[in-house]
Image (cartoon, helix red, strand yellow):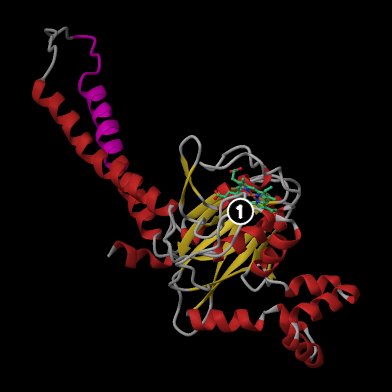
Amino acid sequence: MMSALLARGDFWMPMQGAEGAWVVDWLFYFIFWVSLVFFIIIAGGMFWFMWRYRRRHEEHGPESNVSHNTALELTWTIIPTILLIPMFWWGFTGFMDARVAPNNAYDINVIAQKWSWRFVYPNNYDDNNLHVPAGVPIRLVMRSEDVIHSCYIPDFRVKRDVVPGRYSTLWFTAKGAQGRTTEHHLFCAEYCGTSHSDMKAKVIVHPSREDFDAWLANADPLKQLTPEQYEAYVKDPEGFIEELRKTDPDLAARLVTPVEHGRRLYEKKGCAQCHTITKDAPSRNGPTWWNVYGHKVLLRDGSSIADENYLRESIVNPGAKIVAGYDNIMGPQRVNDREIDALIAFIKTLRDDYQKP
Ligand SMILES: [Cu+2]
């Protein structure tokens, strides 16, 4: 009931644009009302005692000496404890739910830099605004090109720092409206220099996955080709892009999806000498990349979940975590952040339960 009431936002909170937003608001209002009631009881009691026992010159009545009152002390211990339990419970479970994205989430890469946002989609289209479908869990995989930024979408009740040299993630499921797109604000919430306050974007929520897919297909960099170019591309994608690289390297780079880019780097950068990428390939000098993403990797000491940050570290600083049963023979690789994004995008596709987004 409360969530329906607050769908449009109120004095304290903006509208609830995401499915998990009501938990945050529920907890906020619970703590708010508990605080208000206790403020009135405590401050009111204080004033009442001040008045009731104020000093009066004329009278010197007998002084009481009550040392304690067990019933009263139990009451003011037990009632607050009962009130604290739901605060902790909702705070903790709400926090965990907000941190851990569901497995079927749709990944969008986010690059923050002074002073704009770039949202990169699987087809390598990138946009300064964030487009998402309603009703689909979205996971933002974010990195920064320079200083610390913070991705903040007040209507969704989500905020997370974006830090150079590592990935941070954030997830939400946006609520949509029937038959039309809706918009929300996205801000940078970490002071990042002169134009920090300009570092904002729109979140555009498409009413359905179909509508979003149609938008994304239309935004595909391939749409920038002339009909003749497109024909040539369809006949021989690799050859066409190779040719285009000579005349328009910018467009050529846009035509290569991150996954495809990663596959090429795998060959070009020599990863293929040591890593295999298919299910049954006999392993070479290094562990196979099949089924590594999202799985638990046994290390020489301990284990680690192979998420984006683990893969990144394994590429730029291979000695940091050594896979059990292998030697530390992989040198640090000369790859830039964009190439690491691409390699990870590629590695993500190498698994049994991979589904094309
Ligand atoms: Cu910023």
Q: Residue 49 in magenta?
A: yes
Mark 1 sits on what residue? Answer: 284
Quarter assignment of residue 132: bottom right
Quarter of the image containing the N terminus?
A: bottom left
- Residue at image location 61% in from the left, 79% down from the top: 216
What's the residue type where badge 1 is placed? Arg
Tell me if mark 1 has few (under 14), some (14-19) or many (20+) residues whose alpha carbon lies within 10 angstroms of its own.
few
The magenta stretch is 36-58
Q: Residue 227, how many percent across, how many down?
A: 78, 92
Vertical order, 298 against 129 (above or below): above
Vertical order, 175 against 290 (above or below): below
- Residue at image location 62% in from the left, 82% down from the top: 217
Determine if residue 199 is in view.
Answer: no
Q: Residue 343, how many percent across, how many down?
A: 65, 59
Q: Considering the numbered disc 1 on the image, is that residue within a helix, a strand or a loop?
A: loop
The residue at the far right in this view is 247
Is 306 left, or right, of 254 in this rendering? Answer: left
Q: Nearest the camera: 7 or 220? A: 220
Vertical order, 356 against 63 (above or below): below
